[in-house]
Amino acid sequence: MKRWSVVLFAVGLPGCMTNPSPQSPDVFAQLVGKWDEVHAESCKNPHVLSFDGDKTTMLIEYAELGWASENDSRKIFRYEILDVGPATLRARLENEPRMDEEGKPVVWHIVVVDAETYCWGRDDWPQGACTPPRKRCGTDGRQL
């Protein structure tokens, strides 16, 4: 059984985001690469994060399986990019199984904490709330 925990980071989610545009490339460049959960000893089930050419879709592909919920495992997660901030993307997962209190699919924030770390927030969570972080994997298969 997978459990999600929320951690409050000192990272504020930008209050002002914009639609995806070539003027905001930094967050995309910072997120491209191979990542794993922070508690992993090494990158045993990493995921590769990438974007399509026009940066309207984000793909996350796991070496094995990733989990959207207790009953929903996938190898590939496809997100529609809704908004772009300096260190945050707001995105909707295709076929999202989780619903907010209004019964609508949740909307995610992928937050760049630093060059080697990101975490996930949601529209329906308090500002600054994040999942446990993900860490970048090095070429040697270990976390940086």
Image (spheres, rainbow, N blue to C red):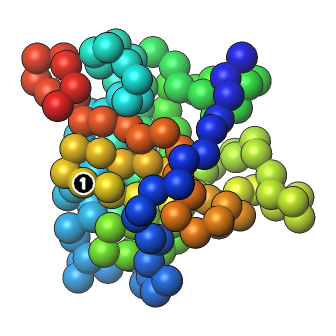
Left or right of 143, for residue 92: right
Q: Is residue 84 above or below residue 8?
A: below
Front residue of 64/133: it is 133
Q: Is residue 50 among what the camera can see?
A: no
Residue shown at 27% from the left, 64% from the top: 27
Which residue corresponds to mark 1? 114
Which residue lies at the image location 80% right of the left edge and 57% below the top edge? 100
x 38%, y 75%: residue: 85
| Image quadrant containing the C terminus | top left
Left or right, residue 27 beside residue 2: left
x%, y% of residue 75? 50, 25
In the rendered image, residue 39, in percent from the top left (x then y), is placed at: 40, 23
117 in relation to 137, above or below = below
For the point 37% across and 30% down, which residue is it? 38
As drawn, the residue found furthest toward the left would be: 139
- Relative to the observer, which residue lies in front, 115 or 33? 115
Q: Quadrant of the N terminus?
A: top right
Is 91 situated above or below 2? below
Residue 99 visible in rendering: yes
Identity, as a three-letter code, of the amino acid under mark 1 = Asp
Q: Is residue 144 above or below residue 82?
A: above
Give coordinates of residue 32: x percent, y percent: 25, 47
Graded by Cα atoms within 10 Å as few (under 14), some (14 to 19) or many (20 or more), the crowding at tag 1 reads few
- On the image, the x and y values in percent for residue 23 come to 23, 82
Furthest residue toward right: 102
Quarter holding residue 126: bottom right
Judged left or right of residue 6, residue 53 is left
Provide the secondary structure element on which disc 1 rests. Answer: strand
